[in-house]
Amino acid sequence: MDRHPDFPHVPERLSGLVDLAYNLWWSWHPEARVLFKHLSSPLWKECIHNPVRLLRRLPPEVFAAAAADPDYLHRYDIIMHRFRRYMTAPNGWFQEAYGTGPGLTIAYFSAEYGLHHSLPFYAGGLGFLAGDHLKECSDLHVPVVAVGFMYSEGYLHQHLSADGYQENITERLDREAAPITRVTGEDGEPLVVRVPLMDPPIAAYVWRVDVGRVPLYLLDTDHPENPPACRAISSRLYSGDRELRLQQEIVLGIGGRRMLAALGVEFAAVHLNEGHSAFALLELLRERIEAGVPYEEAVREVRGTSIFTTHTPVPAGFDVFSDELMERAFGRYRDALGLSREQFLALGRHPDAPGAGFNMAMLALRLCGHANAVSERHGAVSRELFAALWPEVPAEQVPLGAITNGVHLPTWLNPRMASLYDRHFFGTSPNWLEEHDVEAIWALVDGIPDAELWQLHLGLKTKLLNRLRERRRRAFATGAEDPAKFVAEGVLMDPSVLTIGFARRFSTYKRADLVFSDPERLRRILTHPTRPVQLIFAGKAHPDDEEGKRILQRIYGFARRPEFEGRIAFMEDYGEQTAQYLVHGVDVWLNNPMPPLEASGTSGMKAAMNGVVNCSILDGWWLEGYNGRNGWAFGTDVPGGDRTGPDADAVYRLLEEVVAPLYYETGLDGVPGGWVRLMKESIRSCAPQFSARRMVKEYVDRYYPQLLACAATGYRSCTGAGVNEEFALVDEGV
């Protein structure tokens, strides 16, 4: 494999910069990013913190100067030593807990990965959950190999017209300027995987992203052998075209399995992050059947070594394909499984809706022996949702567990906050970052002086608001922007004012416009003479979601209205970098979805570890996170009905009677002591409990050993409920 393009202008003394740039380890180690930034701070900013693009654009004299600078070389040697030690350390938490040796690798499949904005292979929370999972597996030495798509057009860039309508902008990924490398075969030519089921078979290139110790392999159908329509299969996330969506999932699942085989990557078990890649299970089934394993035994083996994580709380969230599409795509493939048409289609039937089509979640549940939801509340919802697969079992006993999501703390914790924790934790817990899932460590937050924490937070808020102004300044310099947009996009925001952030995908159930239910009451809150409030919104609507676009446009319209005095802003083109500024810099993180439709949510977790206080509907992760002292909760636990009025009133009352008064209640030193206590409790209670470290350890302790043991014993010790061990296809007796 060609590790990276040639960089002849980088001197040998600094050649490690190239290796470092092509491993996303730098994305969660601030000291490594500083190494690149010091080469040219303006260009680092212009390259949007992408070290590969930076190295390609810097002239030779910059590297020559750095190679002659003793201070830079000293820093370089320290960082490269840390990086190489990290990459070569033979053992970590996983090996200490579960041993070493072959047969321990987990293949992790996901349709999207949120790793860094230089690799726009994500649409939202599902992708960032997958990206954080890989980073934490790397930190803990969990042996994982990941499979996904190389989306050349990413998801979408968002541009707002003068009236706030979302315009979807496509920007092709510059592969030569991204931390991604093409995989080559033994002949030195690009490795090509061919995916069956379509005529002719689809050819796919393979790309690799190094996420610390974890390799992520990505399929790319932009190959000259493919017809134009097939070249676009991997171009963009989540097509609304059903046939193209089916082709994507075939390439991801079946192609992903064949890609790992072509790479010679052996794995003992499979973890599906949502049902998009569930066809990988069919490929594993086909391999066993063609090797002579009886169907029932092959199903047992696949179930015993597979886990399915569902993130969806409503039936409409699962991909369903028509029988006609499935028959057209899998007609010959099902012959290799030895199944008739009805037997094959029965694998994806929902028992309560047998005529609805082929459901990918049903397929995943029937062929996975283990399954989990992503919060305790979502677990209860999912057990009801899938109860029909276990008709003899009470819904509360349906064998589907729950592992609440977590976020990768080194990625989402602001470096200044990390330095603050270093100073105050070091004496008692010098390894706090390595042990950040230990709850007792976080009691040390109480020892941080209130004024020190508060001043740091105000600095991060100022940085966020400066970011808003800088974006508008750059737009103004092009001469292409309407100056009337500037107020709506935050140039009048004041760092001394209580600032509330709301950043979500603009889907109807997220209710981004809830606080606008009574515009006049909201105006009074925002423009209060002594306790003003300001709101910052960010997020994208799906390209096909017109209702989501209308909600976004409505909010943008309010931001433009003079009676709100510039207290509302919309931050355009929400992405990973924008999210960093928001979760570090706002005072309050607002979340008000329609329960129980928030499977988990993770943005509030990122905010909490940085001292931002959550104000949220009791749904998803906040049902577990809220303790009465670390933020605010509103809404009832009764689903259904029109909750808009009561929920909006609850938010207004909290802002009027509790949140704003507490924020502005300062002592003689100018520090709001009550508010800072709330910040500390938010950090203390949420940072360890909702970390990806806790989450990954939970997956490993609860599921991975059973999967690996099943394979290690020749499938004799397979456990896991699946649908049931006596699963038989309806009316066919298979």
Image (tube, rainbow, N blue to C red):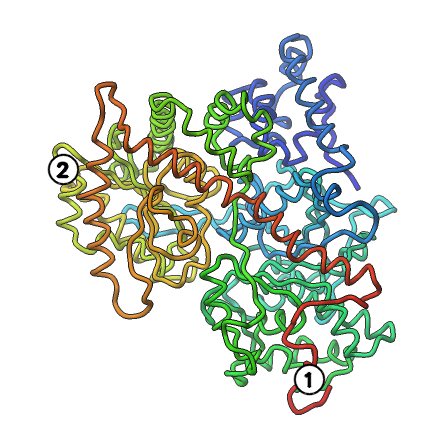
What's the residue type where badge 2 is placed? Answer: His
Between 360 and 422, the one lying in front of the other is 422
- x then y, percent, for residue 499: 28, 37
Q: Is residue 411 above or below residue 234?
A: above
Closer to us: 443 or 55: 443
Would you say 272 lies left or right of 397 here?
Answer: right
Above-or-below relation of 139 to 453: below
Between tags 1 and 2, which lies in front?
1
Dividing the picture into quadrants, the one containing residue 200 is bottom right
Q: Residue at x 48, y 22 (%)?
A: 424
Task: Please name the residue shown 17% across and 47% down the image.
Answer: 522
Task: Estimate the x, y position of residue 411 in percent, counting from the top left.
Answer: 54, 36
Q: Quadrant of the C terminus?
A: bottom right
Q: Is residue 200 visible?
A: no
**To which residue does mark 2 refer?**
528
Left or right? Give the position of 624 relative to 555: right
Viewer-closest of 3 and 82: 82
The residue lying at 46 percent from left, 28 percent from top is 417
Q: Nearer the viewer, residue 30 or 48?
A: 30
Relative to 290, 510 lies left or right: left
Measured as percent of width and height from the top left, residue 356 is found at 51, 81
Picture disc at residue 728: 1
The numbered mark, 1 or 2, whose residue comes first in the sequence reads 2
* Observer able to see residue 539: yes
